Amino acid sequence: MNSDTSPAARLADATTRIARAAALRPAPHPVTLIAVTKTRSADEIAPLIAAGHRAYGENRVQEAESKWPALREGHGDIALHLVGQLQSNKADAAVALFDAIHSVDRPSLVTALARAMDKADRRPDCFIQVNIGAEEQKGGCPIADLPALLTQARTAELPVAGLMAVPPASVEAAPYFALLAKLARDHGLAGLSMGMSEDYETAVLIGATHVRIGTALFGPRA
């Protein structure tokens, strides 16, 4: 698409591409397009809200707190997803603001989230983030630690919706998506948060239930 195409037109294009890819699955299922609004202004986001889109993703609790209460006014059906790393000391704020947390990746965070959910009597969906490429610089639990972390999360009564991963950059993502899908099946999980602007169609073909798209909707960040 041309760089001057409106976000709403890009949203329609991405939605069509997702539907086309999902229809090729042996057992098609709904796919949630999370519009990632990290660093995007309210003026950039408003056209997508006006177009009827209701699932949005932010990377940081503080940024979300600064802009989403106003954006959500009059739109109580907007679902906000935390797709970036979460510090344990931000668990209370995250539970209060977000409807889903995609970056649960360590025992201390499970403990903090369970405590925050009990205190707030609010239980956002949780995705366990897996470091699918074993990259030192990335968040996510090691694959070998996934069974123990899942057991802890379930024991703590976190609503575990599925797994999330970010494959290594600049390599073919499909094998990593397939591995995440296998891990989800092995652990009886239906949700797969995987796929971003450059590879979301591949992710949907392999079974993604949630794709996280920013640049393909808003263009490159300044």
Image: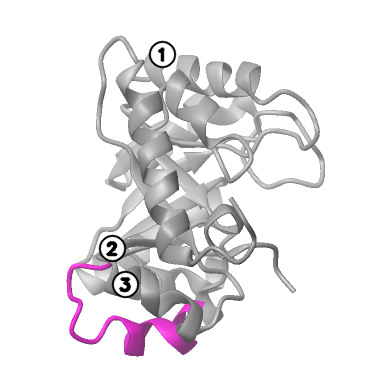
Q: Is residue 162 visible?
A: no
- Give whichever of discs 2 and 1 has the lower sequence position: 2
Q: Amino acid at mark 1?
A: Asp
Do the residues bearing badges 2 and 3 touch, measured as CB atoms within 8 Å? yes
Label 3: few (<14), some (14–19) or many (≥20) C-alpha neighbours in 10 Å = some
Residue at figure coordinates x 53%, y 23% from the top left: 180
- The tag on residue 55 is none
Do the residues bearing badges 2 and 1 touch, measured as CB atoms within 8 Å? no
Residue at figure coordinates x 48%, y 19% from the top left: 183
Between 94 and 55, the residue placed more toward the observer is 55
**Residues drawn in magenta:** 64-78
Residue at figure coordinates x 52%, y 58% from the top left: 217
- According to the picture, the residue beneath numbered tag 1 turns out to be 186
Residue 130 picture quarter: top right
Q: Is residue 204 left or right of residue 80?
A: right
In which quadrant is the C terminus drawn?
Answer: bottom right
Element type where label 2 sits in the image: loop
Residue 196 x/y as whole percent: 57, 43
Residue at figure coordinates x 49%, y 35% from the top left: 149
- The tag on residue 49 is 3
Q: How is the image coloured?
A: one colour
Q: Amino acid at mark 3?
A: Ile
Q: Is residue 3 left or right of residue 146?
A: right
Task: Give the Cα distance between marks 2 and 1.
Answer: 31 Å
Do the residues bearing badges 3 and 1 touch, measured as CB atoms within 8 Å? no
Between disc 3 and disc 1, the foreground one is 3
Element type where label 3 sits in the image: helix
Between 197 and 108, the residue placed more toward the observer is 197
Residue 119 x/y as whole percent: 27, 72
Residue 97 x/y as whole percent: 35, 74
- Give whichever of discs 3 and 1 has the lower sequence position: 3
